[in-house]
Image (cartoon, helix red, strand yellow):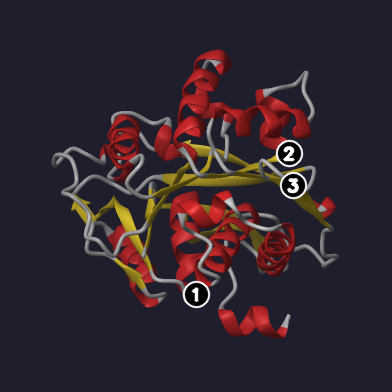
Amino acid sequence: MILVCGEALIDLVPGPTGAEFAYLARPGGSSFNVAVGLGRLGAPVGFLGRVSTDRFGRMLRGRLETDGVDCRLVTSGDEPTTLAVVHIEAGEPAYAFYGEGTADRLFGLDGPPPAFPDEVTALHFGSISLVREPGASAFEAVMRREYGRRILTLDPNVRPSLTGDRAGYLARLEGWVSLADVVKVSRADLAWLYPESTPDAVAAAWLALGPNLVVVTRGRDGCFGVTHRDRVETPGIPVVVSDTVGAGDAFTSGLLAWLHAAGQLERGSIREIQADTLAKALEFANRAAAVTCTRTGAQPPTQSELASF
């Protein structure tokens, strides 16, 4: 089972409602989206995080359960649910977070999670759950505890409005990269993190820190993945875009689901993955992201939807 670790929140997504303009409440959060995406693609998946007992929290837990996500490691709190107000700027989503004292942010309040069952073979981390304290330190502690025991995957999904000092955040991020077996990052993230470097140069530098696979997404231009032997590039898939909210998360879930189904989400397999195998994984992930772009908000595809796309 792939255990996705992180935040679950509500995205308030803009959309017309008759003559008025309104915000639609949609379950979201990068980690939450990855878990839902994996469940919809038929991968065995669980979620490690904390949700509210309020109406939004019940909505989040219900969505996880409906999409086949194991919620045994989900804890609850009476604090409110984090809200993320989505603004579309130049075709890209920007976020304003309202999360002071919210349930997901207080992950670890009930103590560290117990040892995971043997069925957990991989853990995924990323996004704002690794920068908002006190939960961030608790998730990082889980990452360090499980390093060397299970496959670790990372998608930083950078939110500059929350990271604070770039240099300080970058030092922490490179520490997480050194623990991960697989890292996925967007071109936009890298442009903010390393404005003087190219994506290829950063991918090579990150490989040297420890991972066996680094994947860089480039929106409509597709993506590329690098290992210690190969560089594999796949083109983007043209679609009529509704918005790109959740597209990166759908890519991540598609990548992890394909690797798991192919028996590649294991330490030895990732280290030795062949170029043609990686190309198939990247193409599958691209398609998952493309379908999501045709919808409003983070709505990753199911297996059947992806098969017919």
Q: Quadrant of residue 22?
A: bottom right
The residue mark sitting in front, 2 or 3, is 3
Indicate left or right for 114 with 303 as reference.
Answer: left
Category of crowding for the residue at label 2, using alpha-carbon neighbours closer than 10 angstroms: few (below 14), some (14–19), many (at least 20) = some
Work out which quarter of the rendered image holds the N terminus and state it: bottom left
Category of crowding for the residue at label 1, using alpha-carbon neighbours closer than 10 angstroms: few (below 14), some (14–19), many (at least 20) = many
> How far is mark 2 from mark 3, CA to CA?
19 Å
Please say whether residue 252 is visible from this viewpoint: yes
Seen from the viewer's position, the closer of residues 18 and 46 is: 46
In the image, residue 292 above or below residue 214: below
The residue tagged 3 is: 230
In the image, residue 172 above or below residue 59: above
Indicate left or right for 56 with 262 as reference.
Answer: left
Q: Amino acid at mark 1?
A: Arg
Q: Quadrant of residue 277?
A: bottom right
The residue mark sitting in front, 3 or 1, is 3
> Which callout, 2 or 3, points at the residue further toward the start of the chain?
2
The residue tagged 2 is: 187
- SS class, disc 2: helix
Q: Amino acid at mark 3?
A: Asp
Seen from the viewer's position, the closer of residues 13 and 176 is: 176
> How far is mark 1 from mark 2, CA to CA?
26 Å
Q: Identify the mark at residue 40; answer none if there is no mark.
A: 1
Seen from the viewer's position, the closer of residues 154 and 68 is: 154
Q: Identify the mark at residue 223; answer none if there is no mark.
A: none
> Which callout, 1 or 2, points at the residue further toward the start of the chain?
1
Residue occupying the point 46% across, 25% down: 175
Tell me where residue 61 appears, x and y as whole percent. Answer: 31, 65
